[in-house]
Amino acid sequence: MALLTFLGAIQQVTGSCYLVESRDGAKVLLECGMHQGRRAEEDLNRSAFPFDPRDLDAVVISHAHLDHSGLLPRLVAEGYRGPIHATEASCELLELMLLDSAFLQEKDAEWENRWRARQGKPAVKPLYTIANAEQALSQRRAHAYGAAVEVAKGVQVTFHNAGHILGSAIVEMQVQDHHLHRHLVFSGDLGNTCSPLMQAPTQLNQADVLLMESTYGDRDHRPSDETLEELADILQQAHREGGNVLIPSFAVGRTQDLIYYLGRFYQEGRLPQQAVFLDSPMAIRANAIYSRFHDQFAAEDRAALAAKGAKRVEDWLPVLRCTPTAEESMAINRIKSGAIIIAGAGMCNGGRIVHHFKHNLWRENCHLVFPGFQAKGTLGRLIVDGAETVKVLHQRIAVKAKVHTLGGFSAHAGQSQLLDWASRFEHHPELYLVHGELEKMQTLQAALRERLNWIANIPEPGEQIAL
């Protein structure tokens, strides 16, 4: 019997990783995600893989976010030379994400080693290098949605649109093992059906084993119309008070949503600010990839853009200014009022947003808008939880800005959407909840039992099941 081992994103939201092995000898790694959040969790990225990377036949990636793909360069550095399968758009976004991550790994090690040299301590190596990332990228294999491909002997994979970010996929895996046929479906990250640009997640109805994400398994998102009205009110208040608006944002997915919404406000005459800065080189490059795959946008959003003569999302926000260089980024900090600044990282654990914190977070007329979930252990979570001061760039900064958390912008499905998607499967498959904090999994587990009479399993790290 084929085996499935739960290796990552088990009772936590990052580090997605699962291993499928058949008795015929096929070994397929589903996801190779990075652990993000607290220092102890990030330290897991240096732990030994619980398998020999050289023995793998294939790697399958649901989408390009680093918590699903971020350890691919390290896998390659330790000897994996097989194909890395993903959708066409994901393959393009992987280049963006992995090269940026590798650059940061090298820079972090460089800074750490300067400190270590002064302390007389031995130098550390980066988690992986740009050369490792380039090698991983050379192993990509791009596939269209709906096209079945044999990735290893007896293992066939089909990608279906997950509606989470561009290129995101539900992974359907057919495993033929000693004349036994088993059907595995992994939800990947299911999209919020209220998100702009993305199509609704594809609905499947057959599986023997189902792995389903549970990031927001404990609640539904606020209706997007209410969230948009709240954002519009925040922008008006900031304009009256004369402060800047800071929006930490993920470069891929969340930023494109925000540009779309701000563009809508502009077209409706409801955007009081005259300058919106996109201060993220990665997000700027991601915009170009989104533009190349605009045929994958939801039909109604394509029509809205076309009605204004916009070929790209950013075209219908004329006050958008992109600042790719460090010099352009630093120049923004001379602006004390009237600007909206969108910058990475999404959870404030690095990136240009922390520099804008240094210049704005202590100002009472500044408005800080969190458009999504902030993981435990991150700087963003500390601020959301009410910290009066935070450490930014080795300095203690007072949090005087008005802090807003908008619950309707998540690119993940909420509880009701997860239940609805799962309910369409016939003959309830064996269900395992992954990619969520334990308490959220338990809430979703109870909801599945109460509303669908469906028993959901919460696996333990390293648990192995027979398919």
Image (cartoon, rainbow, N blue to C red):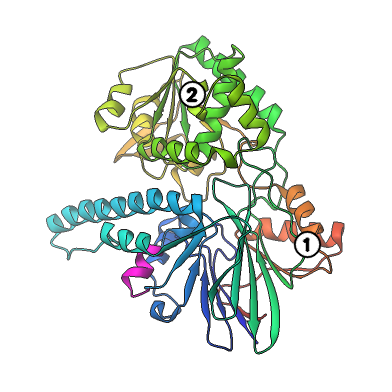
Q: Where residue 95 sits in the image (x, y, percent)?
A: 38, 52
SS category of the residue bearing label 2: helix
Q: In the displayed structure, would residue 125 be above or below residue 238?
A: below
Which residue is at a point 54% across and 37% down the rendered structure image? 294
Which residue is at a point 55% across and 81% down the rendered structure image? 153
Q: Can the viewer see residue 127 in this picture?
A: no
Q: On the rendered structure, is 122 left or right of 145?
A: left
Q: In the displayed structure, would residue 253 be above or below residue 175?
A: above
The magenta segment: 72-80
Q: Where residue 185 sits in the image (x, y, percent)?
A: 67, 66
Q: Is residue 129 magenta?
A: no
Residue with the mark numbered 2: 315
Say whether marks 1 and 2 touch (CB < 8 Å). no
The quadrant in which residue 220 appears is top right
Residue with the mark numbered 1: 205
Q: In the displayed structure, would residue 38 be above or below residue 178?
A: above
